[in-house]
Amino acid sequence: MPGTTTDLAMIAATELVKLYASKEVSPVDVTMACLDRISAHDHAVNAFCLVDDALALKCAHESEARWFRGEPCGRVDGVPTTIKDLLLTEGWPTLRGSKTTDVSGPWNEDAPAVARLKEHGSVLLGKTTTPEFGWKGVTDNPLTGITRNPWNTDRTPGGSSGGAAAAAALGMGALHIGTDGGGSIRIPASFTGIFGHKPSFGRVPAAPLSPFGTVSHIGPMTRTVADSALMLSVLAEPDARDWFSLPYDGADYGDGLEDSIKGLRIAYSPTLGYATVDADVARTVDDAVSVFSDLGAHVETVDPGFEDPYEIFEAHWYTGAANLLRDYTEEQLALIDPGLREIAEAGLAYSLMDYMAAVNKRGQLGQHMRQFHEQWDLLITPTLATSAFSAGEEIRAGLDKKRWMEWTPFSIPFNLTQQPACSVPCGFSDDGLPVGLHIVGPMHDDRLVLRAAAAFESARPFVMPEEPNMGSDNSIDN
């Protein structure tokens, strides 16, 4: 049995359920350990906008009783879990990082993913921070301030699921729901050294649909690949409220996770043919890719052969922002993140014909990648072109960029195509910050992406920080 409460908080979910079944560990003790870590460390990273100790402990005691009877109610009974503050959760306000949301609610509905986790016995600890309405690739907002990176609190954890990533890295829960509209699971996974999986679109039912539309996915963020596979098996269960959702196939995403990747045809694209990547990130990823060859895969350096789809993505994202704020009053708009107001205003400049042209180009990109995967099982790239930069900034200082999606050239294409993609930690930048390896699979083949990630993780295990590495600026209020 683990010797300290800190150990309990860092145990993987897959191991926790085994320990609960053998009665070696109690969900109450694990929940208390996670709450202790939140109390000890969240002041440094600002990962949570809500923590409900009383409800978490009540649910943990109920789970303990079920395990004592040998009657767990689901796959993740008793596992401490967090919810990103974009997903509706009954009894808790879903403020979406915005001062414009009425905290009084009513809050009487669970989003599909939250409902499934509750049905399977998850112990919900609280809600994690997000930029306002999840609009950007870093995590700060007018309501809760700046969220920070556990590896260096001067740096951003990325976004928009930055709170979930920081919580995962520090053992403040084992399972974490993220959302990904342009990289919002994979960006913070890369910046904080955790694992994050963006499932095939429709794999995890969503309701209501993101204001940014069909580029947005819901998925797991965890410290291990196996934990994400376990979580996805729960999240993927059906919900009739999402008319985009895929037919439920009853998959257990943990099955076959440890199977060999020998013989897989893997295309490695260091730049996708158009991206500029920091030299230290490029070196780290180049070195990591050799693991797949060592494991018996056939790896070639191949670009997928499409042009930078930034303008296609911008047309979808900016018009989504314009639609989101279309009925806001001047008083409400004055409370909104200035960057979100700016892209919403830019979105109003798109005509219907402009938007439909972008939709058509998106379809062509999706078709191109479907055909690409007839030859290649997987595509591997860096997750990001840079390592984590200063917290509170949308763009790294010195970059000739205007908006966050300009430094995420590897993530946004696969929101447009809706393919499964993950980020697995693969090493460190020159300044000691995590670097992510990006694995993209053919549409609907989440199993293959997870299997390849698990093979890499087994060959190159990654260790999380025990506590935040405090930078020079320890404030979370500015």
Image: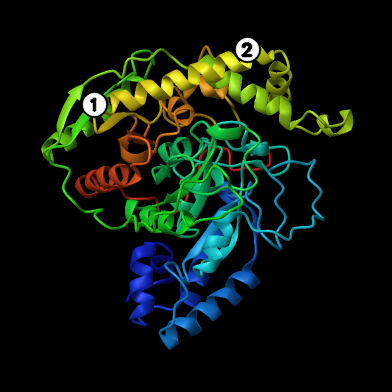
Q: Secondary structure at mark 1?
A: strand
Residue located at (26% from left, 25% from top): 283
Depth check: 471 or 463 in front? 463
Residue located at (34% from left, 18% from top): 272
Tell me which corner region of the image, top left, top right, bottom left or bottom right, holds residue 319: top right
Tell whether 229 sits left or right of 182: left
Number of the label disc, if any, that sits on residue 429: none
Mark 2 or mark 1, which is nearer to you? 2
Residue located at (54% from left, 42% from top): 244
Q: Secondary structure at mark 2?
A: helix
Depth check: 90 or 4 in front? 90
Q: How many marks?
A: 2
Number of the label disc, if any, that sits on residue 354: 2
Residue located at (13% from left, 34% from top): 293
The picture places residue 112, in percent across and down from the top left corner, at 58, 55
Badge 1 amino acid: Ala
Q: CA distance from mark 2 to mark 1?
A: 33 Å
> How many C-alpha atoms fall within 10 Å of the one at disc 2: few (<14), some, or many (≥20)?
few
Tell whether 204 sits left or right of 195: right
The picture places residue 89, in percent across and down from the top left corner, at 65, 58
Depth check: 213 or 332 in front? 213
Badge 2 amino acid: Asp
Q: Residue under circle 1?
A: 267
Residue furthest toward the bottom? 69
